[in-house]
Image: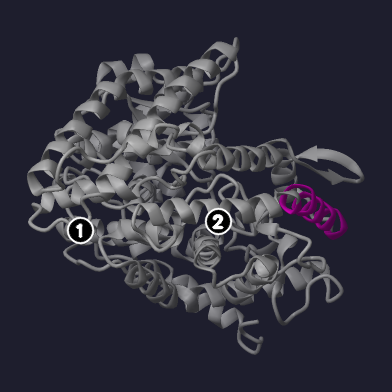
Amino acid sequence: MIRTGISTIALAMLLASPGSAQSQKAAAPAGAATPAAADAFVKRAEAEYKEYSLDAARIAWLYATYINDDTSALVAKSGAKGTEMAVRFALEAAKYDKVQGLSPDTRRQLNILRSRITSPAPTRDGAAAALSNLQTGMQTVYGTGKGTLKGQPISGSDIEAAMGTNRNPDELKEMWTSWHDNVGAPQRQDYQRSVGLLNEGARELGYKDVGSMWRSNYDMPPEEFAKLTDKLWNEVKPLYESLHTYVRWKLNEKYGDAVQSKTGPIRADLLGNMWAQEWGNIYDVVAPPGAGDVGYDIGELLVAKDYDAIKMVKTGEAFYSSLGFDPMPETFWTRSQFVKPADREVQCHASAWNLDDVDDLRIKMCIKVNSDDFITIQHELGHNYYQRAYNKLPILYRDGANDGFHEAIGDFAALSITPDYLVQVGLLDESKVPSADKDTGLLLRQAMDKVAFLPFGLLIDKWRWGVFSGGIPAGGYQGAWDALRLQYQGITPPVKRDETKFDPGAKYHIPANVPYTRYFLARLLQFQFYKAACDQAGWKGPLHRCSFYDNKEVGAKLNAMLEMGASKPWPDALEAFTGSREMSGAAMVEYFAPLKAWLDEQNKGKPKGW
């Protein structure tokens, strides 16, 4: 599951869809574009964001936790104001792009104002409304779309759940095909039109295209960032290929040659997920005999110890407190949504909030006493501690060092939920700690999600970068998508596709125009952070068994990185905690090294690759 932390500046930029950009043409700065004028503009923008932020955040929170017609109207009105402001500031910031003599801080804040809008609308009359209508229409198709199971209509969320448990290949094919045909294909023409409008808006802000605009958020030229993602992928590709080979063989054992060949790509609908992005739902199919049972289930441990939602959150808080972080404020406990209310509609999708950009920290969840939510709590609290760490910075810097950092922090902390940690917090009896021969099962279960996700996390934006640049023509959308899925994931559709289809639209982030590379980066960064913490803690055993619980030195170094927010280039922040200025997949490779050795042994004599 992909989750999000919400800060005010991020909220304002997320609200900057094109629907209300009617006053964009008034954005030009008064007078000459000078360094002094740029400084004054940044201060004015900060002041206006600050004035807007608290009410906007409260309205957004109210809507998320109390959904009705009135709160919908309030959030729409607030969002329109945020959109107008963000677009106006982006256009004005662009006017200073070529000005010489700007201070580094002013230059950085101007770039933030200019580049954080993901859907830039053109300023010409009618263009913003046209783009808004196209994007709203595509998201409506996605949100209301249905597939079929046994010929009966079934919603997207129900298909997602069913594909995780259903082992009938004909029914899996039906669900996959009906969802992609019914939801993706109808968006194709609207998506093509939206690309032209988005690129027009990006060029007005000084970018070649939208892909270049998105890649400019990483403190390096857009072309260099694209090369960096290729480098990172090549570091972890051998691990993925070993996992792919093993899983393909196990699927062949289960379904036979007629469904899944022993060689070539894997059929996309057999991997337990609508998009084949995470494979953990079919762990039962691939689990090694004996080693596959790790001997405990966190959810069962929680039930046995009479945990409820609050006790689960308290345990998560205690982890961060053990590193030296201050406890959550009292308002966190009185204002958060921990469980689903019985009397109203709410958003249950987990998220972390800081409403006043200082210490009004909250999480929004519908917690159930199970393993997934125990780990999700750790993730969401990571967002909260990050938000609080940078709360003294100027408002434009109150964000992660890059968008991968925020997602990685909570996940890196969750990696420390090892058997030894569970013993330390009283959930697992020491005599029940799994022996080393269970490590294969522990690691394979994690790899089915964390490693399997990597190529999907990369190719979503690889495809869009090509579309936005024109490298992928409108007449080749589907073919390019299938080619990238084959090249990176080694998967193939269960039925033949052609250019009447539009399978990218069957993934939410495409019609919603949400950048996706952040999730690829976060999967790698969490292991890089984790190894750094374990090294600082003096851990000497296998990396995957390390827990840095109760280590104040780790906490102090972590906080030094977190409190930098977005005020410095991300290599500075990375260096503050890990000692390295380069993102790397090496820590993930080391973490899963015992599993890769085991996979390679199982794969002996079997064809590798696709």
Q: Residue at x 69, y 68 (%)?
A: 475
Q: Residue at x 37, y 22 (%)?
A: 56
Choose between 424 and 157: the one closer to the eye: 157
Left or right: 532 as drawn, with respect to 596:
left
Left or right: 578 as drawn, with respect to 434:
left
Circle 1: residue type: Lys
In the rendered structure, which segment of residues is drawn in magenta? 169-185
Q: Is residue 474 above or below residue 395?
A: below
Circle 2: residue type: Gly
Identify the mark at residue 48; answer none if there is no mark. Answer: none
Contact between marks 1 and 2 (CB within 8 A): the answer is no
Q: Is residue 566 above or below residue 586?
A: above
Choose between 140 and 571: the one closer to the eye: 140
Residue identified by numbered label 2: 196
Q: Residue 27 placed where, x, y %?
A: 31, 38
Residue identified by numbered label 1: 98
Q: Is residue 377 above or below residue 419?
A: above
**Crowd around label 2: few <14 · some 14–19 · many ≥20 (10 Å):** some
Left or right: 114 as drawn, with respect to 427:
left
Queried whether the magenta region covers residue 508, the answer comes back as: no
**Crowd around label 1: few <14 · some 14–19 · many ≥20 (10 Å):** few
